[in-house]
Image (cartoon, grey):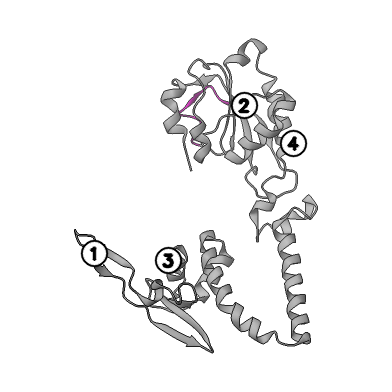
Amino acid sequence: MRAEVASSGAGIPAFFTATGVGTQVADGGLPWRYHSDGSVAKASPAKQTQVFQTHSGEQEFVLASRAVGVKGLWIVLRHILPNVLPVLMVVMAAGAVPVARWAQGPRRTAVLAAGLVLAAASSAVITLPLLPASSTRHIAGLNAQQGEQLGWPDMVETVAGVWQQIPAQQRDRSVLLVFNYGETGAIARYGPEHGLPAPYSGHMSFADWGPPPDSADGPVLLVVPAPNRWVTPNFKDCRTVASIDNGYGLDNELWEHVVKLCSGPVRPWSQLWPSLRHY
């Protein structure tokens, strides 16, 4: 169903698949509704089938009338809808049989094998952390996730330095709150070795871990983007004490983040938490 809806969005009105051929899915007869005595009141109809050079396929209609698959590729290239991947699966499946039919003989098989090796190598470079950090910006346009962890260790050291500025007698009542859940995870990973407490965040599902206790009414250390209207109405006497730079000139989630030190929340955390949740 997901593939059908995604195909619809790409403008593919219908496609054939061998899935279900030779079963009641294609031949019909699956019970849809029953009588009170248990007998079948309505059964599924047979689906249209067609033979493609000895390959039978069951037709599955989707909710669109335009058969333009280029739109799906455009979406992927523009990184607007990452969930369009099911469309690529459909296109790949559609091309598998013609490619397998074409790759007859040792020469064409060798060409196909070389293409697969090249595709695997390029995919590895784009998706795996194989390149030096300084080269990550060259592929960030294809896979932004490659650069998201750049600067994390330095960011944690900066935050730890600011945390030490809080008087020791107040740290038990202090809270470390991070705007983005990626940086929150980085602090949870690297923070303990720098003496940082467990961080909190209202970002997406990280907010489900809950707010700090209401007894934590001391200073609040914030790691937030520099222009952020989320801070002023929720925390008192905030001042910027440090800036964060990933060190590679890459526009990732750390870009233009700052560390702010506030005297405390304006309300108890249990009341404040719903307004701090964001997506």
Q: Callout 1, which amino acid?
A: Ser
How many residues crowd mark 3 within 10 Å: few (<14), some (14–19), many (20+)?
some
Tell me the mark number nearer the camera, choosing from 3 and 1. Answer: 1
Front residue of 248/104: it is 104
The image shows residue 21 at horizontal and vertical percentages of 46, 76
Q: Which residue is mark 1?
A: 39
Which mark is in front, 3 or 2? 3
Q: Of label 4 and label 2, which has the lower sequence position? A: 4
**The disc label shown at residue 154, or none:** 4
45 or 73: which is nearer to us? Answer: 45
**Labels 1 and 2 touching (C-beta < 8 A):** no
State whether residue 32 appears in this view: yes
Q: Is residue 57 left or right of residue 112?
A: left
Q: State whether residue 276 is above or below residue 141.
A: above
Q: CA distance from mark 1 to mark 4?
A: 69 Å
Question: Going 60% across and 81% down the picture, which residue do you hit?
Answer: 97
Element under label 2?
Answer: loop
Q: Secondary structure at mark 1?
A: loop
Tell me the number on the disc at residue 198.
2
**Which circle, 1 or 2, is nearer the viewer?**
1
Residue depth check, mark 1 versus mark 4: number of the one nearer the observer: 1
